[in-house]
Every structure is written in C-alpha cells, then in structure tokens.
Amino acid sequence: MEVKLREIAPSRVRTALLAVPVTDKGLGDGLARRLDRQLKGRLAALVKRSGFVARRGSSLLAATHGAIPAEHVLLVGLGKHEEEGLHAWRMAGAVTAKEGGRVWADEAIFMLPPDQQTESVVGAVAEGALLNAYRFTRYRSNDKQKARLRTLILGRTASGRNAALTRALRNARLSASAVCLARDLVNEPPSTATASYLSEQATAHCRGEGLKVEVWDKKKIERMKLAGLLAVNQGSREEPRFIHMRYKPKGRPQRKVALVGKGITFDSGGLSLKPARSMETMKIDMAGAAAVIGVMSVLPELAPDVEVLGLVPTTDNLPDGGAQKPGDVIRYLNGKTVEVMNTDAEGRLILADALLLAAREKPDCMINLATLTGACIVALGNEVAGLFSNDDELAGKLIQCSRDAGESLWQLPLTPEYREDIKSQVADIKNVGGGSAGAITAALFLQEFVGETPWAHLDIAGPAFTAKGHVVCPKGGTGFGVRTLLNLLSGSQPE
Ligand code: BES
Ligand code: MN
Ligand code: ZN
C-alpha cells in the first residue's frame, strides 16, 4: 500500500471512500458536521439509528448516493476527546485501510482535522494503515483476490510544514517495514527459518550506511565460549549462529544501546519435551530476534544519533541423542555455573551468553526481548508484555515509548527474595525456579548476567503472536517490540 499526503477539499473530492475521524463528542462542529449538512442530515440520522459510538477502532460507513462526489463517508472513532493518544490515530488509519478494502476501494482519503496536521498524527495514521495491510501469503496457493486498498491519501486542508510531515510519513513507512520484516521472520515455517536462515535474512536486510552484520558460525561460537548457546544446540542437527550487528551514526553518537533478541527458531522443549499442543506455535520463539533484526534493518535510513549493538543468539531446541540433559552443568564466560534442571528453560541459557557480551561493551543501556515464559502469559495475557528492569529511568522511558507505539508493557518486580528459588545444590544457580512466579525467576536468572549495566528485559511470550488477529495485525506474528524500540532510539517522547 502507498500512503501520500495531499491537499484535499473534502466536499468536492471524487473518491471511493472519504474517512473522517470523530471523537465521542459525536459529529462535533467540524468536517463531519459539514458533510452531514451536505448529506441533508442523513449522517446524523444513521449515527442515531445504528447507535454508533466513536470508540477507538470503531467505524460507521455511509453511502452518499451522489450528494457529494465521494461515494462513501466513513466515520472513524477515536475514543474519548480528552484522551485520544497516538494509538487512537494509528487504529484509525488501520480501520480506514480495512474498511476501504471492504467497499472495494482502490483509493481512500483520510481527512486530517485542521488542528491535527502534526508529524505524530500523520505518522501514526500512515503506520496504522500500513500495518493493517500486512499479509503473509507466501504459502497460500489459491488466496482469493481479497479486496485491498492500494492507496491511502492523508488529506490536509492547510499548507505549510510540508517537509516535516513528509519526513513523518517516511518514518512511518520505515517503522512499518521493520515491523513487517519481523512478522515475516516469525511467520516463516520453522524448518525453513533456521539459525542460518535468520542469519542470511539479517545479512540481506541489514545494509546501508553505518550498519555492519557479522555472522558467527559454530567454530567462532566455540572460540568465543558461548556455552549456553552450544549447550542448547547440542540436541539439534542445525548449526547454531550468533548474529552480531552494529549501527554507528555519522559523527559522535549521543549514547550506545545494546539490543538482544532470543532466537530459538523452534522450541520443542528439548529432552524436557513439550506436549504437542504447546509446540504448535513454537516457531514464534525467535520473535525477540525478529524484532531486533527488524529494528536494525531501518537504522541506516532512520539515522538516529545512537550507536546500536544488536545481538542474536540463535538455534532450535530439539532432543536428539546429543541433547543436553537435565542435571548437566554449563560454565559461562564470566565463570558462573548453571545447572540445567529443565531443558525447556532454554531461552535464558542462550540470552545469558549474549547479555555477557553486550555488558562487556559498556553500553548506556541494554534491552533484551524474549518469548521467555508461559508464566508471563498467565500473568498478563496476550496483549501485554512483561517489563523487568534494574533501572527505573530506563523502565519509565520504555513505558512512555511503548504507549506511543500502541504496545502495552507492564512492569513486574525483580523480587530479591525469589533469588532463593534459583539456587542450585550443584552449581551457582539453576535454570528454573520453584514453580510459582516463573516470569520473575526467569528475569532474575537473566539479571545474573547483566552486572551493573542499566538493563531491561521484555518478556514478549504473550504479545509476540496473535491467534485472533486485530486491526493493526492479522493472525500470526505481530512484530511486537519493534515500534517501542524505534521510539526509544529516535528519542521521540510523548508530546
Ligand atoms: N518459549 C517458551 C515460552 C513460551 C511459552 C513462549 C508459550 C510463547 C508461548 C520457553 O522456552 C519455555 O518453554 N518456558 C518454560 C519455562 C519453564 C520450563 C521454567 C515455560 O514457560 O513453561
Ligand atoms: Mn522452552
Ligand atoms: Zn523457548
């Protein structure tokens, strides 16, 4: 889909679908009201008859029957007038794209209210439309010619501030392409999307000024003593990889951020085998890696003033004859030993290697993303990721950035008392806790490997995948985390 900006006279423009945002104040006294007058009150009557409430994500379609040149008017709900927020605009863009498809429109116009022709609103509406349009169709041989909107025009009434809005539009395209790359990587079947596939994809997509990708093979991983990654990989026929990406801006960077993504390309549990039902979606266990690769892929064009290190340890977790066994002990780079009690708690084992390497670089902060625990889904469900951090300022920033991104984070504690639960009789620590607070004990395990570096862990096990689908994302991988991280890196704070 293409998104453009154009000056539009709404009552005179010829188009299949004219979308007009409205708040819970009803038709208000702006464009929606003027159109209603031209439609001889039919819009107001329809609102009344249908009981339409302008909630976030709701919409009401009205045929114009020639009263104006536009064929349909679409009222798009923003929610409460006082608390629209950026995500309401993102959802409005997505709803417009969806409804445009439903009326077989090739092109739709979304009218920006005169007081909302800002960079952040333009960016959010465009991003929402692009995210709605995403499909994973590579393996669909007879996908019906689904109705798809081809062009969305963001209609402006005023002129001026053109360069800034054009830049916002471009950033939205970049952000959407990063999210969609992450979705593609997650949706790809697990026997294709192996560690070497992920590495090839990272190499192919992460190019451009200032960005370098290095892929470490098994030999190099052995030389670097990445003990956790090697232990998990023991049960597999596929070789592991460690993807090392670095973005350096022109001139002196303001800060340095390390991103680490869990790249388990399929999680069978290993010898601590999962039941069949729990394995069905375990191709998504590299969603953290996918998010990091997605983010890195757009940095040359986004050009933030930040040095970004992207690290992805990747392998599948399978139970062949060489597989690691419950009771085995791993010795890490920093000398710490871990007793593996459950081979299904493999994510933390490979993240430990990467966090150790990242911390050595002394970044200003490091953030890891991982589909780490079923326990986090029990706690927060599929819409909200768990946030753990040893640094309140970083946690606060992430929450702000996630709000703007329309990605929910909820902070959970790194309760020191639960540290007892990961003590081992044989080694320094073990890789599972006592049974309860599984999301917290997993985070406490990771904390053992971050030292004093300001660090945040996002447990994205729930929101990495949507079984139901929603207006900004069809069923499947969601690309969760990409938009939050991009907001953090581009330093965009809420207005
Ligand atoms: N990849 C899973 C976590 C997961 C579960 C992600 C469901 C997405 C959906 C992780 O490796 C895992 O198996 N965790 C175990 C940990 C346990 C053995 C301590 C879990 O959550 O059951
Ligand atoms: Mn597992
Ligand atoms: Zn896993």
Image: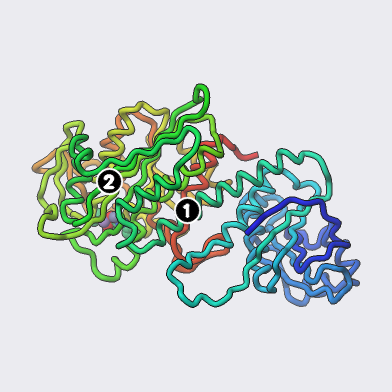
Expressed as whole percent of the image width and height from the top left, the position of residue 215 reads 31, 41
Q: Which quadrant, please, contains the N terminus? A: bottom right
Instruction: Give the residue at x 36% y 49%.
Output: 200
Tag 2–tag 1 contact (CB < 8 Å): no
Q: Can residue 392 be seen?
A: no
* Disc 1 residue type (three-letter): Leu
| Any part of residue 196 in sight | yes
Q: Residues within 10 Å of mark 1 (few under 14, many from 20)?
A: many
Numbered label attached to residue 181? 1
Name the N-terminal-most of marks 2 and 1: 1
Note whether 360 is above or below 302 in the view shown.
above
Horizontal arrangement in the rendering, residue 170 relative to residue 338 (left or right): right
Percent from the top left, x then y, of residue 438?
A: 29, 52
Where residue 274 appears, as percent x and y from the top left, is: 23, 64
- Taking 332 as reference, is 485 left or right? right
Is 423 left or right of 241, judged from the image as shown? Answer: left
Amino acid of disc 2: Arg
Residue tagged 2:
241
Expressed as whole percent of the image width and height from the top left, the position of residue 289 reads 37, 48
Question: Which residue does the image show at 13% across and 52% down from the upper left?
Answer: 324
Packing grade of label 2 (10 A; few <14, some 14-19, many >=20) is many
Nearest the viewer among 147 and 95 is 147
Q: Marks 2 and 1, how far apart in space?
A: 19 Å
Q: Is residue 346 left or right of residue 25?
A: left
Q: Nearer the viewer, residue 145 or 321?
A: 145
163 to 43, vertically: above or below: above
